[in-house]
Every structure is written in structure tokens, then in C-alpha cells.
Image: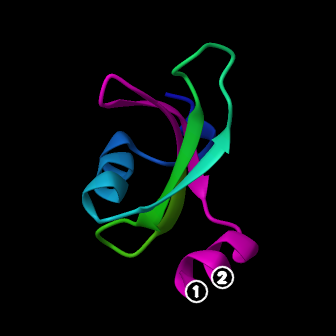
Amino acid sequence: MKNIKHHVTQDEVEEIFFNHPKYRFIELGNKSGEDIYSASGQTNVGRYLVVFFISKNNLALIIGARDMDSRERRRYERE
């Protein structure tokens, strides 16, 4: 997982998916069925993260994760 440089742990990524995230389509993948999505949400301690993933066979293949920037956080709080 490419999250080391952003100091996001695997546990935090899992918390996003369990804490009712907001999903967005990001872009078409290079192969059919490998489109890229994001999940935005909060960890159990309130950290705002965005996780990028490929949805394949009902699994989320994590590409990366990072803290939301200020624009993403405003959009998250509005929706």
C-alpha cells in the first residue's frame, strides 16, 4: 500500500470504509471493470481521509490514501 509517505495506516483506511464514507467516481481504468473511485470520511479519532481504490469483485483494491485537502473537506462536510 502506498500510504507510508502520507502517514496513513491500514487500520485507518479500513475505518473509513466502516464509517459510512462518501464515494465518488474518479476515472475510467485502463481495463474494463477497473475504474478508480474515492472514499472520503473520518477515522474513529476524527481524521479526515480520502482513499483511492479500484472496486473489483466486491473488493476494494487500495491505490493510496491521504488527508483531505481544505477543498475536499468543505465538499465532504456539505454533502
Secondary structure beneath dot 2 equals: helix
Looking at the rendered structure, the kind of residue marked 1 is: Arg
Which label belongs to residue 74?
2
Residue 70 is left or right of residue 76, and the answer is right
Q: Are marks 2 and 1 in contact (CB under 8 Å)?
A: yes
**Which of the pair 68/8 is nearer the observer?**
68
**Whole-percent x, y for residue 56 in the image:** 40, 24
Question: Which residues are the magenta region?
Answer: 52-79
Residue at image position (62%, 13%) is 31
| Residue identified by numbered label 1 | 78
Q: In this view, does 12 lie to the left or right of 52?
A: left
Q: What is the count of numbered marks? A: 2
x and y percentages locating residue 76 in the rendered image: 56, 76
Nearest the eye: 60 or 15: 60
Q: Position of residue 51 (x, y in %)?
A: 52, 48
Tell me which residue sits at (25%, 57%) in the image: 18
Magenta-colored stretch includes residue 71:
yes
Mark 1, secondary structure of its residue: helix
Q: Residues within 10 Å of mark 2 (few under 14, many from 20)?
A: few
Q: Which residue is drawn at 65% across and 24% down?
A: 29
In the image, 63 versus 58, the foreground residue is 58
